[in-house]
Amino acid sequence: MSTALVPPPVAAVIVVGADTEPTVRGERWLRPLERCLAALDRAVGSVLPADVNPFLQLGAVANWSFLLAVVTGVALLLFYTPSVHQAHASMLAMDQAPWTSGLVRSVHRYTSDACLAMVLLHALKIFAARRFSGPRWWAWLTGAFALVTLWLIGWLGYWLPWDQAAQHVAEGSARALDAIPVFVDQLERSFVADSEVNSLLFFLVFFAHMLLPLIVGVGLWLHITRLARACFLPGRRLMLWSSVVFVGVSLAAPAVTGAPAAMGVKATSFAIDAWYLAPLWLTDRLGGGWLWLFWVVAGAVLCSVPWLLVRGRIRPATVDLAKCHSCNKCSADCPYLAITMVPRTDGRRYLQQAQVDPAACVGCGICAGSCDTAGVGLAWRPGDEIREAVVVQVERAVAGGNAPQVVFVCAHAAPVAVAADRLVVPVSCLGFVHMLTVEFTLKAGAREAVLASCGDGNCRYREGDLWTRARLSGDRGPFLRRDRVAAERVRAVSLPPGADVAAVLAGAPPRHPVGRPLVGLLVLASTVVLTIVGSFAPYRTAHDDNPELVVSFKHPGQLTEERRALTAEEKAALPVHMRREFDLVRARQPVRLRITVDGRQVLERTCAPSGIWGDGNAIALERLVVPAGSHRVDVAIGDGADPSVYEHLHGSVVTFVAGRRHALLFDRQTGFRWH
């Protein structure tokens, strides 16, 4: 919107039009979510100082949790045996040593859970605040990549204990991978019987679990490449206290290993770590094709958010070379590395000039607050013109006998109500306000200048509030000249969405409503409890207690040859030395399967040869529900050209037990085998 000065019916003036960002579809639903999250921040802030408030440093806390998870994961190599036959036993040994290996394992689990929880909450806050438009698409996409990779690490990590949850992770993963036509064998067949579990596949999963954290590190590096002074880790106090919490939770609720994986057992329920294993609900109930469709659609929606929801474009800052004196302040203050100093192009005596990268600028206007000559800023909201307009309106109000309170408020802060003695100046970011504007406003006769940011330690543009407070205190230029204005006439306050605006502007001392500290403690306790509960969430599988008959084979059909006479045209198309009368066509016959239970045929199907040329093995994996009790099972497999002849026959009486799988496997070398 354009800047407009609208005189109200009383001696107050409002400067309208500050938000430089494009609008977002669904914004009216996102704003309540943003206010709710801001209320949580304030509640925790009533208990904890900003430097130890994890809700104000979600990304940094997630990184610290990830680092602890990596360190404890490496330490677990001293106690874990990466073998499908010994993995579960080594996990049980850890459970029996709660003060050594068990503690390391529990810390590894809870730091992993906290990392994912903090990343999800961080993403939710970014989404609710609509901080994904314009150049911030890069941070959104790289953050999504790091999130998916982090989840994949946990998903594969829960494969390694080889308990019941791991069994379902393996089966679901195999089902999804089998939908991709690139594997020679069917991975799901590896989990039909305990003896068929592929040890090499297990080791590959272990290797991937160890390697993927490096990929996450690359993703995090890409995530912050467009940020100046990125805070990768929290302060020492928060790192110390969070580590103490992780150890305390690990001792209070140690991680335990579930029942061992058994391919012949149909588990109906067990505990899972819902932070990473919630997708089991999908992998247990959907086929491979549907799983890929779901993930592809979900990924496409997630990655398209910066374009799907945003309407319009961000207008970047511009440089007026005639006013640029090569001071480098704008480049030093830009939170997004959007301004660089380049060699001078206009022939003036200054060696350098500021240059704005439109692909990196988010239109915050912080550069305008750092430039004494107004050489850089937002062209549609010139800082010097706004300064003159505000001074004129203050002088008019003073001439009318009313010295107003001037409130420079971030457009993303809580809305400030109009009052008869108040001049409200919305700005794109508090860092946009130049200290000369504050000084001239007070000299014009304003009663007080209030600089209201959108959040204490949680500025929408990262450093606007920080630079403003540093300029007021004289720690960073351009600073407020305290020798020319009275210090008590200038205040910097925070007005996050939902704040008590009237009390803050009235100068009431900071205090929290009755019960607010209790709410803050409740939020912190709920966060810890939610992490613990999510680590031991009950899960109901898609299975029932009915016995199951599993029949599987990997078997080549008979090879047949057929001589086909070539036509005259086909002969002529061949080189002279390769011309022949006949072509020899070789092909594998499909393999036929017939299953009969108690003399009643329950299944008959034909399995085509695998491979691009149809010359590979035919593969079958059939699951049938059979009532409990003893039943006669007859299986016939035919691999020849005669469809009425079955070359491989098997029949036996099997006692089917509720909650069990009874697998019959066949291959050419060993024949039929029950498991």
Image (cartoon, rainbow, N blue to C red):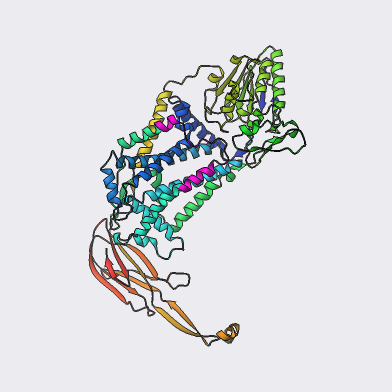
**Relative depth, front residue between 20 and 59:** 59
Q: Is residue 232 magenta?
A: yes
Residue 601 visible somewhere in the drawing: no
Q: x and y percent of residue 151 in the render? A: 43, 47
**Relative depth, front residue between 160 and 520:** 160
**Relative depth, front residue between 639 and 353:** 353
Q: x and y percent of residue 533 in the render? A: 35, 39
**Relative depth, front residue between 569 and 327:** 327
| Relative vertical location of residue 209 with respect to residue 113 in this rendering, above or below | below
Horizontally, is 661 left or right of 134 in the view? left
Q: What residue is shown at x 40% (from left), y 46% (from top)?
A: 276
Residue 288 visible somewhere in the drawing: yes
Residue 134 sits in quarter: top right
**Residues rendered magenta in the picture:** 214-240
Horizontally, is 256 left or right of 37 in the view? left
| Relative vertical location of residue 621 with respect to residue 40 in this rendering, above or below | below
Q: x and y percent of residue 566 in the render? A: 54, 85
For the image shown, how many numbered marks are present on the structure?
A: 0
Q: x and y percent of residue 47 in the render? A: 43, 25
Q: Residue furthest right?
A: 347
